[in-house]
Image (cartoon, grey):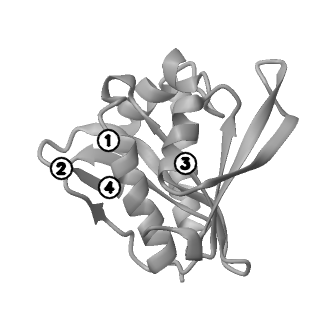
Amino acid sequence: MFPSEFPELTTERLLLRQIDAKDQSSVFQGLSDPAVIEFYGVSFPTYAATEEQMEWYTGLWQEKKGIWWAICDKAEQTFLGACGYYEYEQEHRRIEIGYWLLPKYWGKGYAQEALKEVIRYAFDELQVERIEAYVETGNSPSDKALLKQGFLYEGTMRNCELKNNKFISLKVFGLLRDHSDS
């Protein structure tokens, strides 16, 4: 069941809180960084254009179609990246997960720590049966992150999206409630 109040989550090192207006510069920093957007579905060339993403985060929550969190260092409240769900289908108890981190925080286990808690929340609180992830081919760090969380690779949708005037393929990963470690 979709929560009535925005859920704040914590882990040993992280605070996952609602993304708000003060995060726009960090969101722009991430979603305009060539290293982040190389395998990410959206990018923004200007700070002003990032307003579209901020509205998307808010709209997901208001329309009960998803939840995206700011991933923050618990001690310093530093914005590290974002993660969450979209395409929430309550009827089918299915959700899609996504995430990104600013490059200076890569390789420190933050994505794993955030994913573990977000997955737990989806199964325990939202009562979903299935979590899906779509990863652009070539993004092996994301593949590894999902596999570490128990996702199974289910196949590749070849040339299924157009990005920068080129067709890209997406790997499909799935995690079922009864196959999770959460």
Residue 147 numbered tag: 3
Whether pointer 3 and pointer 4 mark residues with C-beta atoms closer than 8 Å, the reply is no
Would you say 86 lies left or right of 180 here? Answer: right
The image quadrant where one finds the N terminus is bottom right
Q: What residue type is labelled 4?
A: Leu
- Dot 3 falls on a residue whose secondary structure is helix
Per the model, the C-alpha gap separating discs 3 and 4 is 22 Å
**Nearer mark to the viewer, of 3 and 4:** 3
Would you say 160 lies left or right of 7 here? Answer: right
Per the model, the C-alpha gap separating discs 1 and 2 is 17 Å
- Dot 1 falls on a residue whose secondary structure is helix
Q: Toward the viewer: 95 or 151?
A: 151
Determine which residue is flagged by label 4: 16
Rendered residue at 51%/32% (across/down): 141
Earlier residue among tags 3 and 1 = 1
Determine which residue is flagged by label 1: 22
Whether pointer 2 and pointer 4 mark residues with C-beta atoms closer than 8 Å, the reply is no
Residue 170 image point, x, y percent: 75, 38
Earlier residue among tags 2 and 3 = 2
- Dot 4 falls on a residue whose secondary structure is strand
Per the model, the C-alpha gap separating discs 1 and 4 is 15 Å
Q: Which amino acid does label 1 sit on?
A: Lys
51 vs 57: above or below: above
- Dot 2 falls on a residue whose secondary structure is loop
115 vs 45: above or below: below
Q: Residues within 10 Å of mark 1 (few under 14, many from 20)?
A: few
Residue 74 numbered tag: 2
